[in-house]
Amino acid sequence: MTLKTLVAGAATALALIVPGNAAETALVAADQARPILERLSGTYESVGPERWYGAFGHRSFRFDDGRWSLDFTFGFDPALDQKVFTFSTEGPYALVAPSDAVPQAHHTVFFEDVKRVTLHIDDPELVAQMGMADCGLEVGVSVDISETGCANWKPVAECG
């Protein structure tokens, strides 16, 4: 699967990986930022519970030398004490072109090599309602769905 988006906040990302003060970092031009963003290394975590379809989610994005990964945990309560599932994916990313709308940001394509789902709840009725009953999921086990897909997640081969 490819996800097209803007890698915004390049100045913030650069501040984390480029020596010097924030003012110097903010002056880095888009063409100078590109090689740095292609080697980006760091983690973005949700700062608090995020509203997702009447429940809550938490995202953890990691970038490491041209690769990215995401762990998304979905649950019923803001503290995620009642987790339902965690979806994980990873792959390479590629900067396409500088953004005309957002300074120091780039249009970026995120590719997926691997997709996994971990079920955290033992509720067959809920699992069926989410379309996950035929995915071969077991509570507490990370299941690779890269080839088969699951619910609305398509197999990696079907994603462009």
Image (cartoon, rainbow, N blue to C red):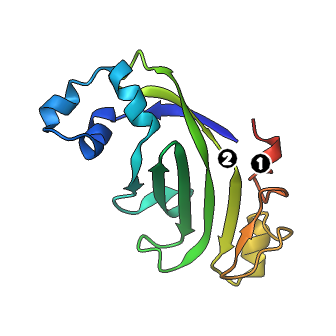
At label 1, counting other C-alpha atoms closer than 10 Å, the crowd grade (few under 14, some 14-19, many 20 or more) is many
Looking at the picture, how far across and down is residue 91, in whole percent?
A: 62, 48
Looking at the picture, how far across and down is residue 108, in whole percent?
A: 53, 31
Q: Considering only vertical position in the picture, is 100 above or below 156? A: above
Q: Residue furthest top?
A: 100
In the rendered view of the protein, which quadrant contains the C terminus?
top right
At label 2, counting other C-alpha atoms closer than 10 Å, the crowd grade (few under 14, some 14-19, many 20 or more) is many
Q: Quick check: marks 1 and 2 in contact, CB under 8 Å?
A: yes
Q: Which residue was labeled with disc 2?
A: 112
Q: Secondary structure at mark 2?
A: loop
Quadrant in which residue 21 is drawn = top left
Q: Quick check: 9 left or right of 112?
A: left
User: Label 1 sits on what residue type?
Assistant: Val
Q: Residue at x 52, y 42 (%)?
A: 66
Q: Secondary structure at mark 1?
A: helix
Task: State which tag comes first along the sequence, 1 or 2.
Answer: 2
Looking at the picture, tell me which residue is in the foreground, 54 or 21: 21
Q: Which residue was labeled with disc 1?
A: 156
